[in-house]
Image (cartoon, helix red, strand yellow):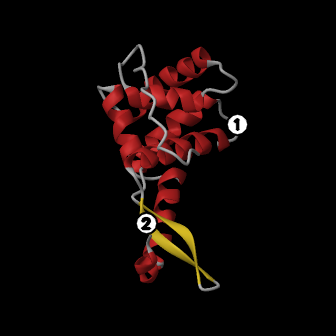
Amino acid sequence: MSRRRRAEKRVTVPDPVFGSELLAKFINKVMIGGKKSTAARIIYNALEKFSKRVKAENQLEAFEQAVENAKPTLEVKSRRIGGATYQVPVEIPTSRRVSMAMKWIITHARAKAGRSMEEGLAAELADCYNNQGTTIKRKDDTHRMAEANKAFANYRW
């Protein structure tokens, strides 16, 4: 991390099929070992299965809604004050919200045993779209933790 100035945000090139930057970032997060074409194929197939599962006409809008439902708004950060460590609730910046939601969706899709990544991703996106499943539970746990430590909000920095 630079001490002189903030790092510049890189511009993400939109994905070729839907022209969405959000989907392009999602493809980059799914990618392992630089195999972008494989990651793209997995995601596009998963989007097809997902849209059939939730009966959505527009795949991209359904995907964006699923990610929106998975985005957390608050989290806790440890803050050391006078020898004691407090869990202080803080609001999450927009870019980090999206990043956390994508990371959780991908992690829980990979964790689904006995399924291919396409099927796991389609199932996890469908769960997020319907506000249920492990990713939404993770978001709720994060919010619950922040709510429980609301008394330490005055230690925000």
Residue at 55% from the left image edge and 47% from the top image edge: 104
Q: Position of residue 63 (x, y in %)?
A: 39, 34
Q: Earlier in the sequence, mark 1 or mark 2?
A: 2
| Residue 153 shown left or right of residue 105 in the figure | left
Compare residues 93 and 61 and report the one nearer the observer: 93
Residue at 42% from the left image edge and 55% from the top image edge: 72
Residue at 51% from the left image edge and 65% from the top image edge: 141
Q: Residues within 10 Å of mark 2 (few under 14, many from 20)?
A: some
Q: Position of residue 43 (x, y in %)?
A: 52, 25
Q: Is residue 41 above or below residue 6?
A: above
Q: What amino acid does circle 2 point to?
A: Val
Q: Which residue is mark 1?
A: 114
Q: Which residue is mark 2?
A: 90
Q: Position of residue 125 (x, y in %)?
A: 46, 39
> Is residue 51 visible to the viewer in this orientation of the structure?
no
Q: Please identify the quadrant where the C terminus is shown.
A: bottom left
At numbered mark 1, what does the secondary structure look like: helix, strand or loop?
loop
Q: Is residue 125 above or below residue 13?
A: below
Q: Residues within 10 Å of mark 1 (few under 14, many from 20)?
A: few
Q: Quadrant of residue 107?
A: top right
Q: What amino acid does circle 1 point to?
A: Gly
Q: Position of residue 39 (x, y in %)?
A: 58, 22
Residue at 46% from the left image edge and 29% from the top image edge: 10
| Residue 21 shown left or right of residue 117 in the figure | left
Rounded to the nearest angstrom, the CA distance separating label 1 from label 2 is: 37 Å
